[in-house]
Amino acid sequence: MTTNVQAQARPAQKTTTLPPVVILIAGWLIPGAGHFLLKKWIRGTLLFVSILAMFGIGIALKGKVYGPNTAELLDMLNFAGDLGNGLLYVAARVFDLGQAAEQVAIADYGTKFIVVAGLLNIIAAVDAHSLAIGRKAS
Amino acid sequence: MTISHFGAVLLFSLFTSVVFGITQRSEPRLMIRFGVFCFALFVGGTIAASWLMWLIKH
């Protein structure tokens, strides 16, 4: 018995003329922007609200926003995660948000919210890129 | 802003599940199903781990 295990790549419906890399970068800089460019309005809005809310809650909980560092491995990884927030990260650095030392246990939750928001944003941007190149069907 | 530990779990699970649902499935119906599944796993897993820690302590 033979089975066809080769996945057939389905060409995605063209919804934009922009290069996929532009969609990837836009999705990274602004949460959901990659999906907006692909005219996936509801998905883009849900992603934007979710990631923005996680980042905002993290800041409100007095979570820490990491800067470039060569201290400990975890600090460097946290910085990499934070960087995933794109322009939100830049705004936090410019307006000096998340720079206070963590004094309460709940602030550590805030730090994790910010890092995870960045990681989720990267997933969302890659998803938009996958849609743009046809790797993901719809 | 202050938030309870369980409140933090619910918010974290909600937003993370929304993103997972949208990005890991292709059809809207499957997205919702997977999002709900992730949310239940996040919250259920946290509650189970909490009870496990309580049992270890006592």
Image: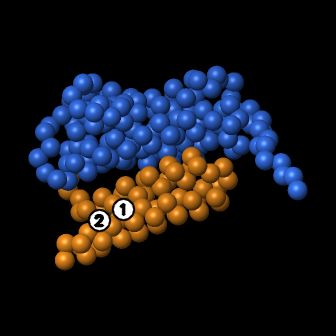
10 Å neighbourhood of mark 1: few (<14), some, or many (≥20)?
A: some
As shown in the figure, which amino acid type bears the numbered disc 2?
A: Phe
Q: What x and y, as percent, mark residue A128?
A: 59, 36
Q: Which residue is rendered at x = 26% and y = 44% of the image?
A: A111
Against A104, is A65 above or below?
A: above
Q: Which residue is rendered at x = 13% and y = 51% of the image?
A: A104
Which chain does tag 2 point to? B
As shown in the figure, which amino acid type bears the numbered disc 1?
A: Leu
Element type at mark 2: helix
Q: Name the residue under label 2.
A: B6
Q: Can residue A69 be seen in this view?
A: yes
Q: What x and y, as percent, mark residue A13?
A: 76, 36
Instruction: Find chain B in the image and tell me its colour.
Output: orange
Q: Name the residue under label 1.
A: B10
Q: In which quarter of the image is residue B47?
A: bottom left
Question: Who's blue, chain-wise?
Answer: A
Q: What x and y, as percent, mark residue B29?
A: 65, 60
10 Å neighbourhood of mark 2: few (<14), some, or many (≥20)?
A: few
